[in-house]
Amino acid sequence: MANYGVTVPLGGLLAEQGPALRELVDLGYTEIWSSEADGADAFTPLAVASVHAPELRLGTAIVPAFTRGPALMAQSVASMASAAPGRFVLGIGSSSNVIVERWNDIAFVEPYKRTRDMIGFLRTALTGEKVVEQYDTFSVNGFRLGVRPPAEPVPILVAALREGMLRLAGREGDGAIVNWLSADDVRRVAGIVHEEGPGKEIVARLFVCPSEDAETVRAAAKRSIAAYVNVPVYRKFHEWLGRTDVLGEHWSRWDAGDRAGSLAVMPDSVVDELFIHGSAADCRAHIERYFANGVTSISLSVMPFAGVDPAQALRDLSPR
């Protein structure tokens, strides 16, 4: 089944989100996904939505494994599970050196192990069991959840780029969350997840702008793409996917400090693979390719380029 989701928060204050969230339900969207970088935290927008739109599945895409201690992470997850029983999904991942080190002053060391250890801790802590454990990347001495444990296990999805995390997602998670990849790339990443865990979820965050002003959209999209593919973990991801040749000159100029030149040489073909644009019908067809190649849920993030109104875009792209 193809599950259509939306990235939140939507525009405006959190206190004003109610009508827009209700409209998402009316339009046929079935889930919403928050993120956590430099905007709202991952949990508060979902708590708001749990009141205004109790029909929606709520997920984080993602919470960094580094920026909350183990006990606080368990408290946050248990609280959301209590606010939305049976409807909350935790998406967790290593995040990046930018968010972890530069913005939060936490050493970005052994990200795979940190994510793996946090998953293992949460699996135990969310049962209400007392945790006394020395993990590879942290220790917990005597924590027990002080609220009622979730009645149903909270699904845990792993943000995954390359093979190690993808296998972790299939083996120890309930699926994977993927980001900034093409529809064709999905076959490769989903295949690795399903080698470890057949049938597990694949959630994709998709960046979309339903506009036929291709020149304006591509110019703006290149800046958005560059902000990711020049972060070390994403550069390695796209090297692994085979984009070294098409992005090599872009990376070379970026590293030399020539930002304008690096954007100028980013091929339009890269934008057209990683960023969904065109008419609403074109965008729908592009989205369907992700589902056809193995994605089970999408989280649409509308980019307001070329004067596109995000609210109207979500209407134009809705399942109904």
Image (tube, rainbow, N blue to C red):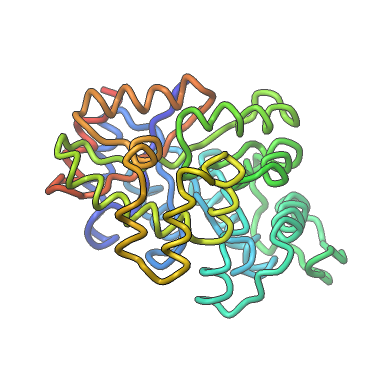
| Residue 312 location (% of width, % of height) | 16, 39
In the foreground, 260 or 84? 260
Indicate left or right for 318 with 38 as reference. left
| Residue 295 location (% of width, % of height) | 51, 28
Indicate left or right for 58 with 177 as reference. left
**Above or below, 148 relative to 40:** above
Q: Residue at 25% of width from left, 25% of height from top?
A: 282
Indicate left or right for 232 with 166 as reference. left
The outermost residue toward the bottom is: 105
Q: Residue at 46% of width from left, 43% of height from top?
A: 246
In the foreground, 9 or 241? 241
How many marks can you see? 0
The outermost residue toward the left is: 307
**Location of the C terminus (image quadrant):** top left
**Above or below, 280 relative to 52:** above
Q: Residue at 75% of width from left, 31% of height from top?
A: 196
In the foreground, 237 or 112? 237
**Above or below, 160 relative to 294:** below
Q: Residue at 22% of width from left, 23% of height from top?
A: 281
In the foreground, 15 or 197? 197
| Residue 158 location (% of width, % of height) | 62, 46
Q: Choose top left, top right, bottom left or bottom right for residue 226.
A: bottom left
| Residue 297 location (% of width, % of height) | 47, 32
